[in-house]
Image (cartoon, rainbow, N blue to C red):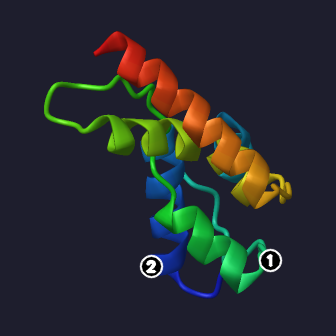
């Protein structure tokens, strides 16, 4: 449950930062400001709220000269599984993740 204005403001700020249109539609009031989530008795699991508040903006990752191919491959893998894993609750086999990581890594070594 959203019980404090600080929590409400944190969620509003994060939704704007992430440009999360789905969340903004749910919490935007008629005056383009956050609806009073405390008065409206908005209810979310505490773990879901905490996870949402720690999310980062999705960006396309391009390997740079400062990044090792291993780091770049891991970043590619994480960016691909982030949403399905944490937002949709998808399940991945470690062997499949390992194989995908190896494919990213092989492609990066071909580039360099």
Kindly identify which residue carries mark 1.
Answer: 43
- Please state, as top left, top right, bottom left or bottom right, where the C terminus lies in the image: top left
Check disc 2 and report its element: helix, strand or loop: helix
* Residue drawn at (51%, 66%) of the image: 53
Residue 85 higher or lower than 78, as above or below: below
Residue situated in front as seen by the camera: 53 or 63: 63
Q: CA distance from mark 2 to mark 1?
A: 15 Å
Residue 29 in picture, x, y percent from top left: 65, 48
Mark 2 or mark 1: whose residue is earlier in sequence: 2
Q: Residues within 10 Å of mark 1 (few under 14, many from 20)?
A: few
Figure quadrant of residue 102: top right
Kindly identify which residue carries mark 2.
Answer: 6
Residue 45 in picture, x, y percent from top left: 77, 80
Left or right: 95 as drawn, with respect to 12: right
* Residue drawn at (51%, 57%) of the image: 55
- Whether residue 1 is visible: no
Residue 93 higher or lower than 58, as above or below: below
Residue 11 in picture, x, y percent from top left: 54, 63
């Amino acid at each position: 449950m959203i019980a404090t204005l600080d929590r409400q403001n944190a969620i509003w700020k994060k939704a704007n930062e992430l440009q999360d249109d789905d969340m903004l539609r749910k919490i935007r009031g008629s005056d383009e400001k956050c609806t009073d989530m405390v008065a409206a008795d908005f209810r979310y699991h505490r773990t879901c709220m905490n996870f949402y508040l720690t999310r980062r903006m999705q960006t396309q990752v391009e390997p740079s000269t400062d990044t090792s191919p291993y780091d770049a491959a891991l970043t590619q893998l994480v960016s691909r599984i982030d949403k399905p894993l944490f937002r949709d609750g998808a399940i991945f086999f470690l062997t499949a993740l390992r194989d995908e990581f190896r494919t990213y890594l092989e492609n990066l070594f071909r580039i360099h």
